[in-house]
Amino acid sequence: MKVYGFGEVLLRFTPPNYIQLKDAQQLDINVGGAELNALSTLAQFGHATEMITTLPEHALGQHVLQEMRRTQVGTQWVQQTAGRLGTYYMEEGFGHRSGQVIYDRAYSTFAQQTSHLLENIAGSKGDYFVFTGITLAVNHTIREHIVSYLQQLKEQGITIVFDINFRSNLWTLEEAVPVIKAVLPLVDILFFGKKDATHLLQTNAESDDMHTCAQTLQQKFNIPFLASSNRSITQSTLQGIALTPDGFIESAAYPYTVLNRIGAGDAFLAGVIHGLEAQWSLTTTLDFATKCSVLQHTTQEDALHLAEADILNLPEHFGELKR
């Protein structure tokens, strides 16, 4: 089994110690991107992975490649061309002050020259293909041809995994909705948030709970497996939910504290795929994925890099100092 990730890789620039961007004198650098984050975690769990993307030929592209190799993510399908690497600047919030993200990714090598790579993918039955709505937002050519690409992949027996991951500062509702609606009937595993159902696709009312939203999406688009990580702002807990042909399940609700919000959903996605491949029960799989998301909030990296055993032992060792 191999997991393919298709998307843009970015450099994240973040001022240290919660300093605001307008006051920053230095910036920390992280390599990330939704699909790469998920693959990096899956590689940590021992799975074969391949990132499908385009990087520039200069030193920043080499920096990204080195980071991918360090985390054991496959680079066979990474092409390099002349151009620029997408970046973004993240100001971390603190207390009542919200964080903010400033993107600088227009005309990146991925946005300009990547779509043809999918034409040559020769996967095997049981492989996974992971992509997000962010990929559709930043590359117009991919957006136009994604349905035919997904049909080709499904003919090879590849499982299609899609995280809606709508970003309003990358494309409008009018642009996104028809593309996402065309993609959803081809998806085998869908990751979504409540606002995707109530505001983006408008399949549900705001008063509907997550179970109802998942049921509506499943019935409307014939999606076998749906999952979401649900935050309770009032209780500061995180809970995983999933709807499968066998029914609706929920994980325990875990308390969490936020050091870093980047990559929590990607860690959840990786946890689900890992549990499915390990042939755990759906309850165990969902619980593991939720723990992955909780723990990602405690790191400064874009991807979760912890051993499976450390994640499984979260309830027994919550907050303890290992000696």
Image (cartoon, rainbow, N blue to C red):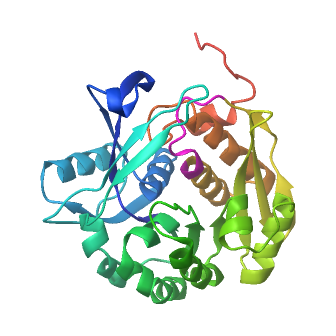
Among all residues in the image, which is located at the extreme top? 323
Q: Position of residue 210 (x, y in %)?
A: 81, 59
**Quadrant housing residue 302:** top left
Q: Which residue is drawn at 33% across and 26% down?
A: 23
Q: Quadrant of the C terminus?
A: top right
Q: Is residue 277 magenta?
A: no
Task: Locate residue 127 relative to residue 206 in the image: left or right.
Answer: left
Q: Residue at x 13, y 65 (%)?
A: 82
> Between residues 40 and 241, which one lies in front from this camera angle?
241
> Between residues 116 and 144, which one lies in front from this camera angle?
144
**Quadrant housing residue 255:** top right
Q: Is residue 189 visible?
A: yes
Task: Locate residue 85 relative to residue 135 in the image: left or right.
Answer: left
Q: Is residue 264 magenta?
A: yes
Q: Which residue is drawn at 78% across and 54% down?
A: 241
**Quadrant housing residue 200:** bottom right
Q: Position of residue 3 (x, y in %)?
A: 48, 64
Q: Which residue is drawn at 58% across and 74% down?
A: 159
Range drawn in magenta: 257-266
